[in-house]
Amino acid sequence: MPISINPQMMREIIMDHYNNPLNKKVPENISEYKKIRMDSDSCIDDITIYLKIVNDKIVDACFDGIACTISTASTDILCELVKDKSTKDALYIVEQYKNMIYEKEFDESALDELIVFINTHKQAARIKCATLGSTGIESIIDGKDDK
């Protein structure tokens, strides 16, 4: 997805993932998942992220809880992007996403719809919302999940 998409299209993508998240659910076989609860002091965000990792591959990713539009949409897109990826590839996606959010050089080809958050840095209060899911996914992969 090119950076040149217009602001209206960006809003539509974000609102679609907020109103109709593909990955918002509590997994049925919850014992097969690693999970982490993520929340924010500055927003309503309070979500639990679930990753099912088998042989160093993320076979499922989902989340549940209450969160603002930015947090819900970014977490939903991230969950979709890391599914069926190795943990190494998932960490690369997270790294590129965070690089974009913090205005560093990034690999646009790794981000797909996450590119809609390219202007998040313009609203500093939204950075925490936009990175809640990526920080949670990174923490689970790094073994800092809720035991």
Image (cartoon, helix red, strand yellow):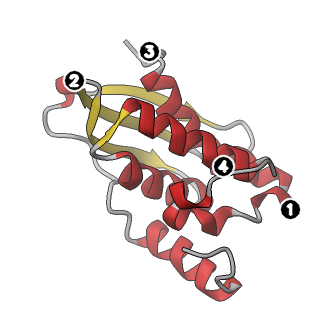
Residue 103 is left or right of residue 112, and the answer is right
Q: In the image, what residue occupies the spot 34% across and 53% down?
A: 24
The N terminus: image quadrant: bottom right
Give me the residue at 38% from left, 44% from top. Answer: 63
Q: Quadrant of residue 55?
A: top left
The amino acid beneath tag 4 is: Cys
Q: Quadrant of residue 58?
A: top left
Q: What element carries label 3?
A: loop
Mark number for residue 122? Answer: 1
Which amino acid is tagged 3?
Gly
For the residues bearing labels 2 and 1, Cβ distance under 8 angstroms: no
Which marked residue is nearer to the observer: mark 2 or mark 1?
2
| Pointer 3 or 2: first along the chain | 2
Q: Where is residue 121 in the image (x, y as percent from the top left)?
A: 82, 56
Return the mark for residue 143.
3
The answer to whether 124 appears left or right of 41 in the picture is: right
Q: Is residue 119 above or below residue 41?
A: below
Q: Which residue carries the number 4 mark?
A: 129
Label disc, if present, on residue 55 of the rendered structure: 2
Residue 89 position, x and y percent, is 43, 38
- Name which residue lies at 51% across and 24% down: 139
Element at badge 4?
Answer: helix
Contact, CB < 8 Å: mark 3 with mark 2? no
Q: Nearer the viewer, mark 4 or mark 2?
A: 2
Q: Residues within 10 Å of mark 2 (few under 14, many from 20)?
A: few
Q: Which of 124 and 118 is in front in this view?
A: 118
**Chain-order first, disc 4 or disc 2:** 2
Callout 4: few (<14), some (14-19), or many (20+) C-alpha neighbours within 10 Å?
Answer: many
Q: Please, what is the three-letter code of the amino acid marked with disc 1?
A: Lys
Q: Residue at x 20, y 30 (%)?
A: 30
Foreground mark, 1 or 4, reads 1
Distance from disc 4 to disc 2, alpha carbons, whole Å, reads 30 Å
